Image: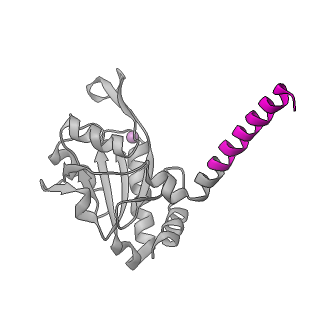
Amino acid sequence: MSGQGAKIIAIVTAFVVAAAVIVAMQLMPGKRAGALVGGPFTLTDQYGKQRSDIDFRGKYMLIYFGYTTCPDVCPTALQEMTVALDELGDAARDIQPIFITVDPERDTVARMKEFAANFHPRLLALTGSLDAVKKAAKEYRVYFAKAKNDEAPDGYLMDHTSIIYLMDRDGRYLTHFTHQLNPSDMAKQIRDHLS
Ligand code: NI
């Protein structure tokens, strides 16, 4: 075999191995994403109580990151979570809905309490220091940044990832939803993951 032929075979082999690894990773979605999404957080809820991820072991967590002055996307996502949980009925008892602010400068405990009252009665609305919020967001691969906007209150909006995460009883990633999904479909998909 020519040197050229051996080189081509080596390259093709490398591609085949890489492709096989990618396929294998996608066949275990829970493990793959589970390693990437989720992790420890310690924040304060709207009642002033400190809450950590470990407090929710044994329950599923339905987690969304956003902010209270968000003009549309965050209220929509939280409303959809609320409707989906209502549709799940008794099965929703095992699910802890959690809202984590990405705008802790404005989202005080009092403000979070007022805002959370618009949604599911068991929703926990968490805030904390900017560092604590940054750490939580990083664990969930949530991006956020201030975006200057002269029309907005205080002159800024927050750009942020808008994803609803479903985590299992051990705090591991199960699946995620976008706020474009309708609540009935969300409820159905959540039900499929409950065991
Ligand atoms: Ni938002």
Q: Nearer the viewer, residue 194 or 45?
A: 194
- Residue furthest toward the bottom? 90
The answer to whether any part of residue 106 appears in the image is: no
Q: Residue at x 34, y 20 (%)?
A: 150
- Residue furthest toward the left? 48
Is residue 166 in the magenta section? Answer: no
Is residue 6 in the magenta section? Answer: yes
Q: Residue at x 79, y 36 (%)?
A: 9
Secondary structure of the magenta portion, mostly? helix
Q: Nearer the viewer, residue 176 or 3?
A: 3
Residue 42 point in image, percent of width and height: 20, 50
Residue 85 point in image, percent of width and height: 41, 67
Please give the range of residues in magenta. 1-21
Q: Residue at x 53, y 71 (%)?
A: 192
The quadrant in which the C terminus is found is bottom left
Q: Quadrant of residue 97?
A: bottom left
Q: Quadrant of ligand 1?
A: top left
Q: Residue at x 15, y 47 (%)?
A: 110
Residue 124 point in image, percent of width and height: 25, 58
Q: Nearer the viewer, residue 120 or 193?
A: 193
Is 164 drawn above or below residue 192 in the view shown?
above
